[in-house]
Image (cartoon, rainbow, N blue to C red):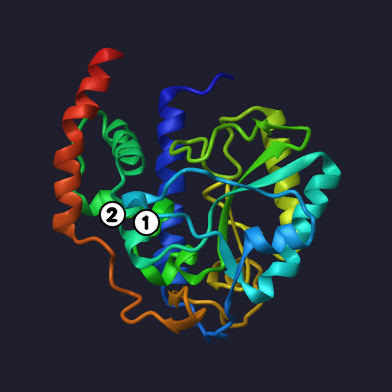
Amino acid sequence: MKATEEDRRSFWIEQSEQACDFMMKKILPYPVVESNEPFVSLREASAQAKVTVLFSDQQHVNNLERLFYLREGQIPGFLEAAKEMNLRGWAIRVEDGFRTREMQKYLGREPKVFDAILQKVIWELNGKTPEPELMFQRCTGLVATVPKFATHMSGSAIDISVMLLDDVTVEVDRGGPYIEMSERTPMKSPYISSEAQKNRDEIATIMLKHGFVAYPWEFWHFSSGDAYDQYLSNTGKPAIYGPVNWNSLTNEIEPMSNPTEPLNSESDIRTEIEAALPSIVLISSLFS
């Protein structure tokens, strides 16, 4: 039976609420015993290992350079996953790695991210404008609104696409591009093709084999050693990677202060809603 718009809306709401609950109830209080492991460049590590790994050429928010780094203890697993992808005829393209506070804060306000989520929430509400509290909740599961559960700020997470090794301009079908913000975004979305789901499952299996767990509500996000990994793997152990400030000159890190404080205030979110509404209304009118 073909899914109705109401089916899609119900799934979006259900998954969004599950993701927010995961962050707020499971990850926010999860214990972290920081390992203080230094960062390692994924570009340098993959070049030294002679593994084909691709990297996004897009600027980050505020025209910042992307920081393709993981923690030292994660590098062997990353390289083995990349090698296995190559043997499969695929190549990992790392879309994002470590994020500073500035990156994470303003990614949550980047129009291509915030506006896409806002458009879905307006659709969820049958055309009504959401209050900042609801937008905060919906953003929480997709762009991590608090450092404590923003695993890119721990240097322990990567966002990836997967390309064909013999033609790196062609992406392996996963049901949507990075960064899809819709009911197709959860790893087990029923709104993608069977081929796309098969590819998602195979990629996740390879990553897990080498220590990286998939975040259930985004098909591109993988991490290890952090609270996501420890909780989803049911290890009972504290996370060894938490949100940190990183000195790129000395490769020294320090745990971030006030990691449970939201990156953007209610006022910030309200301002972004008001700024985005005119373009969203215009787009909606073009397709109505």
Determine the secondary structure under disc 2: helix
Q: Residues within 10 Å of mark 1 (few under 14, many from 20)?
A: many
Residue located at (55% from left, 59% from top): 68
Residue at the image position 55 percent from the left and 67 percent from the top: 228
Q: Quadrant of residue 256?
A: bottom left
Q: Position of residue 9 (x, y in %)?
A: 40, 33
Residue found farthest to the front: 249
Residue tagged 2 = 136
Q: Residue at x 75, y 53 (%)?
A: 82
| Quarter of the image with the C terminus in it | top left
Q: CA distance from mark 1 to mark 2?
A: 6 Å
Task: Answer left or right for 172 relative to 148.
Answer: right
Question: Residue 98's spot in the image, x, y percent?
Answer: 49, 63
Vertical side of 111 occupied by 40: above or below: below
| Rendered view: 85 above or below 276 | below
Verify CB contact (< 8 Å) between mark 1 and mark 2. yes
